[in-house]
Image: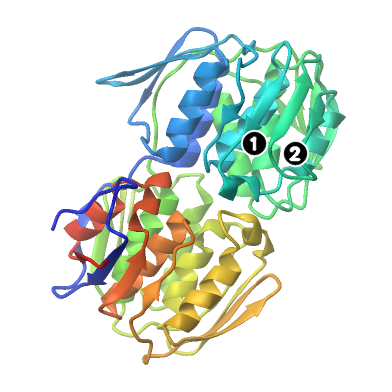
Protein backbone atom coordinates (compact mmCIF):
# COMPACT_ATOMS: atom_id res chain seq x y z
CA UNK A 1 0.00 0.00 0.00
CA UNK A 2 1.05 3.60 -0.30
CA UNK A 3 1.69 5.45 2.93
CA UNK A 4 0.82 9.04 3.62
CA UNK A 5 2.69 11.66 5.60
CA UNK A 6 -0.41 13.84 5.97
CA UNK A 7 -2.77 13.87 8.92
CA UNK A 8 -5.35 12.26 6.58
CA UNK A 9 -4.22 8.69 7.19
CA UNK A 10 -5.66 5.39 8.42
CA UNK A 11 -6.42 5.25 12.13
CA UNK A 12 -3.53 2.85 12.55
CA UNK A 13 -0.57 1.20 10.80
CA UNK A 14 0.38 -2.43 11.40
CA UNK A 15 4.15 -2.78 11.09
CA UNK A 16 6.47 -5.67 10.30
CA UNK A 17 9.91 -5.98 8.72
CA UNK A 18 9.80 -9.34 6.90
CA UNK A 19 12.90 -8.71 4.79
CA UNK A 20 14.90 -6.81 7.40
CA UNK A 21 15.76 -3.15 7.69
CA UNK A 22 18.54 -1.90 5.47
CA UNK A 23 19.23 0.90 3.05
CA UNK A 24 20.52 4.43 2.67
CA UNK A 25 18.68 7.72 2.49
CA UNK A 26 18.87 11.40 3.38
CA UNK A 27 17.25 12.59 6.58
CA UNK A 28 14.84 15.52 6.33
CA UNK A 29 16.01 19.04 7.06
CA UNK A 30 16.08 20.09 10.70
CA UNK A 31 12.87 21.55 12.11
CA UNK A 32 14.86 23.32 14.84
CA UNK A 33 17.20 24.93 12.32
CA UNK A 34 14.42 25.76 9.84
CA UNK A 35 12.36 27.59 12.47
CA UNK A 36 15.39 29.47 13.81
CA UNK A 37 16.33 30.50 10.27
CA UNK A 38 12.76 31.60 9.51
CA UNK A 39 12.73 33.89 12.56
CA UNK A 40 16.16 35.35 11.82
CA UNK A 41 15.37 35.90 8.15
CA UNK A 42 12.05 37.46 9.21
CA UNK A 43 13.90 39.93 11.44
CA UNK A 44 16.67 40.63 8.90
CA UNK A 45 17.06 43.47 6.42
CA UNK A 46 16.57 42.39 2.80
CA UNK A 47 15.75 39.09 1.13
CA UNK A 48 17.05 35.78 2.42
CA UNK A 49 16.91 32.46 0.59
CA UNK A 50 16.55 29.34 2.72
CA UNK A 51 17.51 26.27 0.67
CA UNK A 52 16.13 22.81 1.52
CA UNK A 53 13.86 24.04 4.34
CA UNK A 54 11.64 21.53 6.11
CA UNK A 55 7.97 21.61 5.10
CA UNK A 56 6.01 20.34 8.10
CA UNK A 57 3.15 21.30 10.38
CA UNK A 58 5.51 23.16 12.75
CA UNK A 59 7.24 25.18 10.04
CA UNK A 60 3.93 25.95 8.33
CA UNK A 61 2.66 27.55 11.53
CA UNK A 62 5.89 29.52 11.88
CA UNK A 63 5.51 30.78 8.29
CA UNK A 64 1.90 31.82 8.81
CA UNK A 65 2.70 33.70 12.02
CA UNK A 66 5.72 35.47 10.53
CA UNK A 67 3.58 36.70 7.64
CA UNK A 68 1.20 38.17 10.22
CA UNK A 69 4.20 40.03 11.70
CA UNK A 70 4.98 41.60 8.33
CA UNK A 71 7.56 39.23 6.85
CA UNK A 72 7.20 38.21 3.21
CA UNK A 73 7.59 34.52 2.44
CA UNK A 74 7.52 32.98 -1.02
CA UNK A 75 8.17 29.38 -2.00
CA UNK A 76 10.44 29.13 -5.04
CA UNK A 77 12.02 26.12 -6.76
CA UNK A 78 15.36 26.95 -5.12
CA UNK A 79 13.92 27.39 -1.62
CA UNK A 80 11.94 29.84 0.49
CA UNK A 81 12.58 33.55 -0.05
CA UNK A 82 12.03 35.65 3.05
CA UNK A 83 11.65 39.43 3.00
CA UNK A 84 12.60 40.59 6.47
CA UNK A 85 11.18 43.31 8.72
CA UNK A 86 14.55 44.96 9.52
CA UNK A 87 14.07 44.20 13.20
CA UNK A 88 10.71 45.97 13.36
CA UNK A 89 7.96 43.35 13.06
CA UNK A 90 4.39 44.60 12.77
CA UNK A 91 1.72 44.07 15.41
CA UNK A 92 -0.57 41.30 14.16
CA UNK A 93 -4.18 42.17 13.38
CA UNK A 94 -5.40 38.90 14.91
CA UNK A 95 -4.17 36.31 17.40
CA UNK A 96 -1.23 34.26 16.16
CA UNK A 97 -1.95 30.51 16.02
CA UNK A 98 1.14 28.40 16.69
CA UNK A 99 -0.73 25.11 16.25
CA UNK A 100 1.22 22.50 18.22
CA UNK A 101 4.60 24.13 17.60
CA UNK A 102 6.51 24.97 20.77
CA UNK A 103 9.26 26.77 18.87
CA UNK A 104 6.70 28.97 17.12
CA UNK A 105 4.92 29.79 20.38
CA UNK A 106 8.05 30.66 22.32
CA UNK A 107 10.20 32.32 19.66
CA UNK A 108 7.40 34.54 18.40
CA UNK A 109 6.25 35.47 21.90
CA UNK A 110 9.63 37.19 22.19
CA UNK A 111 9.23 38.74 18.74
CA UNK A 112 5.92 40.30 19.84
CA UNK A 113 7.92 42.37 22.33
CA UNK A 114 9.56 44.13 19.34
CA UNK A 115 6.22 45.15 17.78
CA UNK A 116 4.63 48.61 18.24
CA UNK A 117 1.54 47.44 20.12
CA UNK A 118 2.08 43.79 20.98
CA UNK A 119 -0.26 40.91 20.30
CA UNK A 120 -1.37 37.47 21.44
CA UNK A 121 -0.05 34.04 20.49
CA UNK A 122 -2.06 30.91 21.17
CA UNK A 123 -2.30 27.39 19.78
CA UNK A 124 -4.07 24.06 19.78
CA UNK A 125 -4.99 22.36 23.09
CA UNK A 126 -1.84 20.25 23.25
CA UNK A 127 0.35 23.34 23.01
CA UNK A 128 -1.68 25.18 25.65
CA UNK A 129 -0.50 22.56 28.18
CA UNK A 130 3.16 23.41 27.59
CA UNK A 131 4.69 25.88 30.07
CA UNK A 132 5.77 29.44 29.22
CA UNK A 133 5.94 30.99 32.69
CA UNK A 134 9.71 31.31 32.84
CA UNK A 135 9.75 32.90 29.38
CA UNK A 136 7.08 35.37 30.49
CA UNK A 137 9.23 36.24 33.52
CA UNK A 138 12.31 36.75 31.31
CA UNK A 139 10.47 39.06 28.90
CA UNK A 140 9.14 41.08 31.82
CA UNK A 141 12.68 41.45 33.17
CA UNK A 142 13.65 42.93 29.81
CA UNK A 143 10.85 45.50 30.06
CA UNK A 144 8.04 43.88 28.08
CA UNK A 145 4.49 44.05 29.42
CA UNK A 146 3.39 40.41 29.20
CA UNK A 147 0.54 38.25 30.49
CA UNK A 148 0.03 34.50 30.34
CA UNK A 149 -2.53 32.08 31.76
CA UNK A 150 -0.99 30.96 35.03
CA UNK A 151 2.30 30.10 33.37
CA UNK A 152 0.74 28.62 30.24
CA UNK A 153 -0.37 29.96 26.84
CA UNK A 154 -2.03 31.97 25.42
CA UNK A 155 0.63 34.63 25.95
CA UNK A 156 -0.10 38.32 25.33
CA UNK A 157 2.35 41.19 24.96
CA UNK A 158 0.19 44.16 25.92
CA UNK A 159 2.26 46.80 24.20
CA UNK A 160 5.67 47.17 22.64
CA UNK A 161 8.46 48.72 24.69
CA UNK A 162 12.15 49.50 24.42
CA UNK A 163 13.27 46.13 25.69
CA UNK A 164 16.77 45.36 26.90
CA UNK A 165 18.77 45.03 30.09
CA UNK A 166 19.95 42.10 32.19
CA UNK A 167 17.98 38.88 32.54
CA UNK A 168 18.43 35.47 34.10
CA UNK A 169 16.50 32.86 32.11
CA UNK A 170 15.41 29.72 33.95
CA UNK A 171 15.63 27.02 31.27
CA UNK A 172 14.80 24.03 33.47
CA UNK A 173 11.58 23.41 31.55
CA UNK A 174 12.88 24.29 28.09
CA UNK A 175 16.00 25.65 26.41
CA UNK A 176 13.58 27.36 24.01
CA UNK A 177 13.04 30.09 26.62
CA UNK A 178 16.71 31.07 26.35
CA UNK A 179 16.64 30.83 22.56
CA UNK A 180 13.58 33.10 22.33
CA UNK A 181 15.27 35.84 24.33
CA UNK A 182 18.56 35.53 22.47
CA UNK A 183 16.95 35.69 19.02
CA UNK A 184 15.45 39.13 19.69
CA UNK A 185 18.31 40.53 21.77
CA UNK A 186 20.26 42.09 18.83
CA UNK A 187 17.12 44.06 17.88
CA UNK A 188 16.65 45.46 21.40
CA UNK A 189 17.00 49.17 22.13
CA UNK A 190 19.40 48.60 25.03
CA UNK A 191 22.31 46.25 25.67
CA UNK A 192 21.01 42.83 26.64
CA UNK A 193 22.81 40.55 29.06
CA UNK A 194 21.45 36.99 29.12
CA UNK A 195 22.48 34.42 31.73
CA UNK A 196 20.87 30.99 31.52
CA UNK A 197 20.29 28.80 34.56
CA UNK A 198 19.30 25.14 34.90
CA UNK A 199 20.07 24.42 31.26
CA UNK A 200 19.92 20.69 30.69
CA UNK A 201 20.64 20.73 26.96
CA UNK A 202 23.14 23.50 26.13
CA UNK A 203 23.50 22.22 22.58
CA UNK A 204 20.31 23.91 21.44
CA UNK A 205 21.43 27.28 22.82
CA UNK A 206 24.78 26.84 21.05
CA UNK A 207 22.80 26.11 17.89
CA UNK A 208 20.91 29.37 18.41
CA UNK A 209 24.08 31.40 18.91
CA UNK A 210 25.61 29.84 15.80
CA UNK A 211 22.49 30.75 13.80
CA UNK A 212 22.65 34.32 15.09
CA UNK A 213 26.29 34.60 13.99
CA UNK A 214 25.35 33.26 10.57
CA UNK A 215 22.85 36.11 10.17
CA UNK A 216 25.44 38.70 11.20
CA UNK A 217 24.75 39.33 14.88
CA UNK A 218 27.64 40.21 17.19
CA UNK A 219 27.84 39.33 20.87
CA UNK A 220 30.33 38.22 23.49
CA UNK A 221 30.31 35.61 26.23
CA UNK A 222 31.66 36.16 29.73
CA UNK A 223 33.36 33.59 31.93
CA UNK A 224 30.12 32.67 33.70
CA UNK A 225 28.36 32.06 30.37
CA UNK A 226 26.51 35.38 30.26
CA UNK A 227 25.86 36.43 26.66
CA UNK A 228 26.30 40.18 26.13
CA UNK A 229 24.48 41.51 23.05
CA UNK A 230 25.03 45.11 21.84
CA UNK A 231 21.78 46.92 21.03
CA UNK A 232 20.36 48.26 17.78
CA UNK A 233 21.72 45.57 15.47
CA UNK A 234 20.04 44.44 12.28
CA UNK A 235 20.33 40.87 11.09
CA UNK A 236 21.69 40.53 7.54
CA UNK A 237 19.88 38.58 4.83
CA UNK A 238 21.51 35.29 3.88
CA UNK A 239 21.49 32.65 1.15
CA UNK A 240 21.65 29.56 3.31
CA UNK A 241 21.40 25.79 2.84
CA UNK A 242 19.87 24.22 5.93
CA UNK A 243 21.24 21.03 7.41
CA UNK A 244 19.71 17.65 8.24
CA UNK A 245 17.57 16.88 11.29
CA UNK A 246 19.57 14.84 13.81
CA UNK A 247 16.44 14.06 15.84
CA UNK A 248 14.72 12.55 12.80
CA UNK A 249 17.90 10.73 11.79
CA UNK A 250 17.96 8.92 15.15
CA UNK A 251 14.46 7.55 14.52
CA UNK A 252 15.65 6.11 11.19
CA UNK A 253 18.84 4.69 12.69
CA UNK A 254 16.87 3.17 15.58
CA UNK A 255 15.14 0.97 12.98
CA UNK A 256 18.55 -0.58 12.28
CA UNK A 257 19.46 -0.87 15.97
CA UNK A 258 16.23 -2.65 16.87
CA UNK A 259 16.19 -5.02 13.90
CA UNK A 260 19.86 -5.89 13.59
CA UNK A 261 19.84 -4.21 10.20
CA UNK A 262 21.91 -1.51 8.52
CA UNK A 263 20.91 2.08 7.78
CA UNK A 264 23.01 4.89 6.30
CA UNK A 265 22.01 8.54 6.63
CA UNK A 266 23.79 10.13 3.71
CA UNK A 267 23.57 13.76 4.83
CA UNK A 268 24.27 13.34 8.57
CA UNK A 269 27.25 15.60 9.28
CA UNK A 270 29.19 14.37 12.30
CA UNK A 271 30.37 17.92 13.15
CA UNK A 272 26.84 19.27 13.59
CA UNK A 273 25.97 21.23 16.74
CA UNK A 274 22.68 19.34 17.04
CA UNK A 275 22.87 17.52 20.39
CA UNK A 276 20.82 14.49 19.36
CA UNK A 277 23.81 13.14 17.42
CA UNK A 278 25.16 12.13 20.84
CA UNK A 279 22.68 9.25 20.79
CA UNK A 280 25.07 7.42 18.44
CA UNK A 281 27.34 6.75 21.43
CA UNK A 282 24.38 5.24 23.30
CA UNK A 283 23.65 3.00 20.33
CA UNK A 284 27.25 1.77 20.52
CA UNK A 285 26.90 0.96 24.21
CA UNK A 286 23.84 -1.11 23.31
CA UNK A 287 25.96 -3.20 20.94
CA UNK A 288 25.47 -1.40 17.62
CA UNK A 289 28.39 -0.57 15.36
CA UNK A 290 28.55 3.02 14.12
CA UNK A 291 30.57 4.10 11.12
CA UNK A 292 31.09 7.88 11.05
CA UNK A 293 32.20 9.73 7.95
CA UNK A 294 32.44 13.42 7.11
CA UNK A 295 29.07 13.53 5.37
CA UNK A 296 27.24 10.45 6.54
CA UNK A 297 26.64 7.91 9.30
CA UNK A 298 25.96 4.17 9.06
CA UNK A 299 24.58 2.12 11.96
CA UNK A 300 24.77 -1.67 12.03
CA UNK A 301 22.33 -3.12 14.54
CA UNK A 302 23.45 -5.94 16.87
CA UNK A 303 21.99 -9.43 16.96
CA UNK A 304 21.16 -8.88 20.64
CA UNK A 305 20.66 -5.50 22.23
CA UNK A 306 22.36 -4.66 25.53
CA UNK A 307 20.79 -2.57 28.28
CA UNK A 308 22.42 0.71 29.27
CA UNK A 309 22.00 3.65 31.63
CA UNK A 310 21.82 7.06 30.00
CA UNK A 311 21.56 10.65 31.19
CA UNK A 312 19.58 12.22 28.33
CA UNK A 313 19.44 15.76 29.72
CA UNK A 314 21.34 17.01 26.65
CA UNK A 315 18.95 15.30 24.20
CA UNK A 316 15.52 14.92 25.80
CA UNK A 317 13.82 14.42 22.43
CA UNK A 318 15.42 10.96 22.36
CA UNK A 319 13.82 9.67 25.57
CA UNK A 320 11.16 7.74 23.67
CA UNK A 321 13.67 6.35 21.15
CA UNK A 322 15.83 4.87 23.89
CA UNK A 323 12.85 3.72 25.96
CA UNK A 324 11.50 1.67 23.06
CA UNK A 325 14.89 0.08 22.38
CA UNK A 326 15.45 -0.64 26.08
CA UNK A 327 12.27 -2.74 26.17
CA UNK A 328 13.89 -5.37 23.92
CA UNK A 329 17.43 -5.11 25.33
CA UNK A 330 19.10 -7.61 27.66
CA UNK A 331 19.07 -6.29 31.21
CA UNK A 332 17.81 -3.18 32.95
CA UNK A 333 18.20 0.30 31.48
CA UNK A 334 17.74 3.58 33.34
CA UNK A 335 16.98 6.87 31.61
CA UNK A 336 17.59 9.88 33.85
CA UNK A 337 17.53 13.70 34.17
CA UNK A 338 14.64 14.24 31.77
CA UNK A 339 11.82 15.47 34.00
CA UNK A 340 11.21 18.31 31.52
CA UNK A 341 9.74 15.91 28.94
CA UNK A 342 6.65 15.69 31.12
CA UNK A 343 5.84 19.11 29.65
CA UNK A 344 6.41 18.23 25.99
CA UNK A 345 3.64 17.34 23.50
CA UNK A 346 2.45 14.85 26.10
CA UNK A 347 3.91 13.65 29.39
CA UNK A 348 6.44 11.50 27.58
CA UNK A 349 7.57 9.56 30.66
CA UNK A 350 4.02 8.55 31.51
CA UNK A 351 3.26 7.80 27.84
CA UNK A 352 6.36 5.63 27.44
CA UNK A 353 5.63 3.69 30.62
CA UNK A 354 1.99 3.12 29.66
CA UNK A 355 2.72 1.94 26.12
CA UNK A 356 5.69 -0.24 27.05
CA UNK A 357 3.55 -2.00 29.66
CA UNK A 358 0.94 -2.53 26.95
CA UNK A 359 3.66 -4.48 25.10
CA UNK A 360 4.34 -6.57 28.19
CA UNK A 361 7.51 -4.77 29.34
CA UNK A 362 8.23 -4.12 33.01
CA UNK A 363 8.72 -0.39 33.54
CA UNK A 364 9.24 1.81 36.59
CA UNK A 365 8.31 5.46 36.12
CA UNK A 366 10.75 7.70 38.00
CA UNK A 367 10.30 11.40 38.80
CA UNK A 368 12.94 12.31 36.21
CA UNK A 369 13.12 9.23 34.02
CA UNK A 370 12.38 5.56 33.51
CA UNK A 371 13.77 2.20 34.58
CA UNK A 372 13.04 -0.44 31.96
CA UNK A 373 13.61 -4.16 32.41
CA UNK A 374 14.27 -5.50 28.94
CA UNK A 375 12.76 -8.74 27.72
CA UNK A 376 12.71 -10.90 24.62
CA UNK A 377 9.08 -11.71 25.47
CA UNK A 378 7.70 -8.30 24.43
CA UNK A 379 4.52 -8.89 22.44
CA UNK A 380 2.78 -6.85 19.74
CA UNK A 381 0.09 -4.40 20.82
CA UNK A 382 -1.72 -1.31 19.62
CA UNK A 383 0.27 1.78 20.65
CA UNK A 384 -1.52 5.02 21.48
CA UNK A 385 0.51 8.01 20.27
CA UNK A 386 -1.28 10.82 22.17
CA UNK A 387 -0.95 12.96 19.05
CA UNK A 388 2.82 12.98 19.69
CA UNK A 389 5.01 12.53 16.61
CA UNK A 390 7.92 11.11 18.59
CA UNK A 391 5.84 8.38 20.21
CA UNK A 392 4.85 7.18 16.74
CA UNK A 393 8.37 7.24 15.31
CA UNK A 394 10.08 5.78 18.39
CA UNK A 395 7.75 2.80 18.74
CA UNK A 396 7.89 2.11 15.00
CA UNK A 397 11.47 0.90 15.54
CA UNK A 398 10.20 -2.04 17.56
CA UNK A 399 8.60 -3.58 14.46
CA UNK A 400 12.00 -5.06 13.61
CA UNK A 401 11.79 -7.29 16.69
CA UNK A 402 8.09 -7.24 17.50
CA UNK A 403 6.24 -7.89 14.21
CA UNK A 404 2.61 -6.88 14.21
CA UNK A 405 2.88 -3.80 16.39
CA UNK A 406 0.17 -1.22 15.54
CA UNK A 407 0.74 2.55 15.69
CA UNK A 408 -2.39 4.64 16.25
CA UNK A 409 -2.82 8.02 14.52
CA UNK A 410 0.25 7.57 12.29
CA UNK A 411 -0.40 10.93 10.62
CA UNK A 412 0.81 12.73 13.75
CA UNK A 413 4.37 12.48 12.36
CA UNK A 414 3.53 15.39 10.03
CA UNK A 415 4.35 17.75 12.90
CA UNK A 416 8.07 17.43 12.11
CA UNK A 417 8.58 14.58 9.60
CA UNK A 418 5.73 14.20 7.09
CA UNK A 419 7.70 11.68 5.01
CA UNK A 420 8.63 9.33 7.87
CA UNK A 421 6.45 6.41 6.82
CA UNK A 422 7.55 6.60 3.18
CA UNK A 423 11.19 6.65 4.25
CA UNK A 424 10.71 3.78 6.72
CA UNK A 425 8.98 1.75 4.00
CA UNK A 426 11.94 2.38 1.71
CA UNK A 427 14.17 0.79 4.36
CA UNK A 428 12.07 -2.38 4.44
CA UNK A 429 9.34 -1.65 6.96
CA UNK A 430 6.07 -3.19 5.79
CA UNK A 431 3.18 -0.86 6.58
CA UNK A 432 -0.42 -2.08 6.41
CA UNK A 433 -3.63 -0.30 7.31
CA UNK A 434 -5.05 -1.32 10.70
CA UNK A 435 -8.41 0.30 11.27
Callout 2 crowding tier (Cα within 10 Å): few <14, some 14–19, many ≥20: many
Task: Please identify the quarter of the rendering in which residue 136 is found.
Answer: top right
Which of 409 and 169 lies nearest the eye of the viewer? 409
Any part of residue 257 in sight: no
The Cα–Cα distance between marks 1 and 2, rounded to whole angstroms, is 8 Å
Residue depicted at 36% across the width and 35% down the height = 55
- Image coordinates of residue 242 in percent, x first then y, are 39, 32
Which of 152 and 191 lies nearest the eye of the viewer? 152
Q: Earlier in the sequence, mark 1 or mark 2?
A: 1
Which of 40 and 389 lies nearest the eye of the viewer? 389
Callout 1 crowding tier (Cα within 10 Å): few <14, some 14–19, many ≥20: many
In-image side of 62 versus 334 (left or right): left
The mark found on residue 106 in the picture is 1
Q: Secondary structure at mark 1?
A: helix
Reply above or below: 340 against 119.
below
Reply above or below: 161 against 360.
above
Q: Quadrant of the N terminus?
A: bottom left
Task: Please identify the quarter of the rendering in which residue 410 is found.
Answer: bottom left
The mark found on residue 269 in the picture is none
The mark found on residue 135 in the picture is 2
Mark 1–mark 2 CB contact (< 8 Å): yes
Q: Quadrant of the C terminus?
A: bottom left
Reply above or below: 152 against 10.
above
In-image side of 403 versus 53 (left or right): left
Amino acid sequence: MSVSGSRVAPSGYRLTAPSGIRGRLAAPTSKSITNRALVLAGLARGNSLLRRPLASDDTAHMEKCLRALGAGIQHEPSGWRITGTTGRPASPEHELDAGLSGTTMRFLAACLALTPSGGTITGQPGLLRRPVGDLTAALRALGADVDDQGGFPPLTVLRGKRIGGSVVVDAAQSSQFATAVLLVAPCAARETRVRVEHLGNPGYVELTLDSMRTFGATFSQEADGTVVVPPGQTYAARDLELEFDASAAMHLLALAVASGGRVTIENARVNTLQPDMQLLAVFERMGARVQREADGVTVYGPARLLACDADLSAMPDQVLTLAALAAVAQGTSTISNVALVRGHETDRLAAAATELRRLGAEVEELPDGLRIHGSEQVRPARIATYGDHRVAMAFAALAGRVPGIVIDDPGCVSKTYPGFWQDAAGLGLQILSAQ
